[in-house]
Amino acid sequence: MRPTIAITLGDPRGIGPELVVKALADARIRDVFHPLIVGPTGTGVTVDESVGAWTSGGDGRQAGRLAGRAIERAVALVQSGLATGLVTAPIDKGALLSGGYDYPGHTEMLAALTRSRTAMMLASDRLRVVLATTHMALRDVPDAVTAEVIVETASITRLGLQRWFGIPDPRIALCALNPHGGDGGRFGREDQAILDPAARTAGIAGPFPADTVFVRAMRGEFDAVVAPYHDVGMTAIKVASFGAAVNVTLGLPFPRTSPDHGTAVDIAGLGVADAGSMKAAMRECARIAGLGGTVRST
């Protein structure tokens, strides 16, 4: 039986609505799941409306409010059993905040709505990267990359790889924080003082320098790499697989995926947006949902 997947259309000023239309026009995508579109009409949120009813334009505050309400409604649909997974089109994080939702992004909002401990994974057939910290200023990263964060991220990653990717004993590596892993303390001591003991506690390999660990993973040595901060991990996966990677939120009680790119407001409405990553996100969510990826609360 085909799973039912809730799909939010993202920021109405961006390419999300176009991507959903293009992806669902492909029979190879449409035939593997039943889509339940979640998007606003005016200022409300309607379930299973026509994709074309999503009204583009408006200011950032309105766009963020509508996008945030759609996320809330979609999560409620999955939690009630009307859908078994969630695919989200890109949102504008500044608009989300101005619209009344004080979350750095989808991952943090979904974690709060479901009271879950989550981790952001970017996955393709070439590489899997999991972020220990997500959306924050670079100057705040060293204080945020604690042993507890590394251990918890590794634990969530291991369970996700086992449950949703069928890897019984995942090989997980930790990417270093500093250049050359700190080079014996010359470029910072965080890798020796924090990351190394955390990796041993978590039962993962590393920390290994960023300029080698992702290449080693792409060659098959590791099933996933835990990156200490956003850009080092995102750069690696996007160089390796831009347009083919999928954002998978590990740790949620249901599968959630999204494309590996942003709202691309500059090309919205031109009909030129590439739906490749959205299609991959839909296929991946349907695959996980088909495995029984939704965990019911008791």
Image (tube, rainbow, N blue to C red):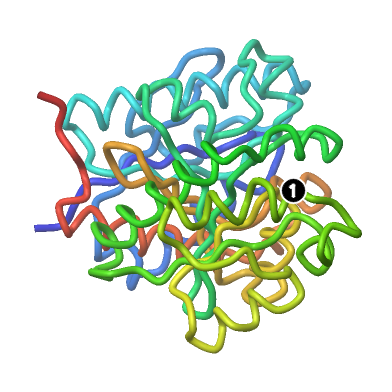
Toward the bottom, the furthest residue is 219
Crowding at mark 1 (Cα within 10 Å: few <14, some 14-19, many 20+) = some
Pick the residue in front: 19 or 252. Answer: 252
Amino acid found under the numbered disc labelled 1 = Glu
Q: Residue furthest right?
A: 186
SS at mark 1 in the image? helix
| In-image side of 248 versus 19 (left or right) | left
Left or right: 82 in relation to 37: left
| Residue to which mark 1 is pinned | 190
Q: Residue at x 55, y 79 (%)?
A: 217
Give the residue drawn at x 46%, y 37%: 8
User: From what the image shows, is residue 267 above or below residue 95?
Assistant: below
**169 lies above or below 119:** below
Say which residue appears at 23% left-offset and 53% top-offset. Answer: 289
Viewed as shown, does residue 92 lie left or right of 68? right
Q: Is residue 92 above or below residue 291?
A: above
Q: x, y (%) of residue 168? A: 23, 69
Q: Position of residue 241 (x, y in %)?
A: 62, 75
Q: Is residue 298 left or right of residue 120?
A: left
Can you tell which quarter of the image residue 265 is in? top right
| Total count of labels | 1
Q: Which residue is more in the foreground, 146 or 83?
A: 146
Q: Which quadrant: the N terminus?
A: bottom left
- Quadrant containing the C terminus is top left
Q: Position of residue 194 (x, y in %)?
A: 64, 46
On the image, the x and y values in percent for residue 63 come to 67, 24
In the foreground, 159 or 279: 159
Q: Quadrant of residue 95?
A: top right
